[in-house]
Image: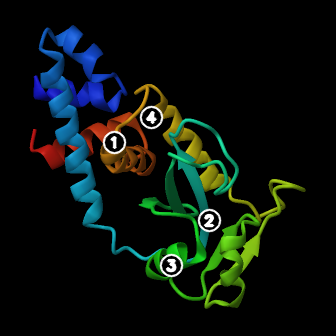
Amino acid sequence: MQSRLVEFFVLEVTARSAADVLGIQPNTAALFYRKLRGLIADQLARVEHEVFEGAVELDESYFGGVRKGKRGRGAAGKVVVFGLLKRGGRVYAKVVDNAKTTTLMPVIQRKIAPDSWVYTDSFGSYDALDVSQFRHVRINHSAEFARGHNHINGIENFWNQAKRVLRKYNGIPRESFPLFLKECEFRFNYGTHKQQLKTLKEWAGI
């Protein structure tokens, strides 16, 4: 049964639907799904020390909440997430208290090697990058979304994918959100369903 539940999880079948197909209690499937998310978070924490270098895209996004709002405004009740994506490599996402420079810069300095190219939009919190050890390029989204290599399409693609995955849950408890976020990071970084299934079964010893 565990092997089948892992398969359903990878295919983004809800715990309730998986339980219905397998003829088990919904709470049993939901508990197993929570354990898988915890396992994913633990495994990703082991590579959290990985430093990105080369070309890295940065962006912040807001999840949940009762109303939409522009950057930092009207964001009451929303969870703030900061994301870094190494072009041609992995994404790293982290729940943060806010999107202020003093909050984001320590994450940037810890995760990105000096002299790397960092790409952002024109959000004011990234102004500090202009006088940092990084090579900063920004794109003004009010005028254009990309100019050659100057874009943040990769990290924005991750936000879109993550919000699509999470939308089906109809609201996620705030305290559980970091685990769901790491699920999205795992899905993005581990490619195909086949690769995800193989990796999860190895991690779970199934």
Q: Residue furthest toward the right?
A: 143
Label 4 Cα neighbours within 10 Å, binned few <14 / some 14-19 / many ≥20: some
User: What residue sits right under mark 1 in the picture?
Assistant: 195
Q: Report the residue at 26% width, 17% height from top.
A: 16
Question: Gap between marks 4 and 3, in whole Å?
Answer: 28 Å
Q: Which kind of residue does numbered mark 4 sit on?
A: Leu
Residue indicated by mark 2: 57
User: Does dot 2 land on a helix, a strand or a loop?
Assistant: strand
Separation (CA) of disc 1 from disc 4: 21 Å
Q: Quadrant of residue 170?
A: top left
Can you say whether 25 is above or below 135 in the image?
Answer: above
Label 4 with label 3: CB-CB less than 8 Å: no
Decide which of 95, 19 is in the foreground and name it: 95
Give me the residue at 50% from left, 56% from top.
81
Q: Earlier in the sequence, mark 4 or mark 2?
A: 2
Q: Which of marks 1 and 3 is nearer the N terminus?
A: 3
User: Is the C-beta separation of discs 3 and 2 under 8 Å?
Assistant: no
74 on left or right of 52? right
Q: Which of marks 2 and 1 is nearer the N terminus?
A: 2
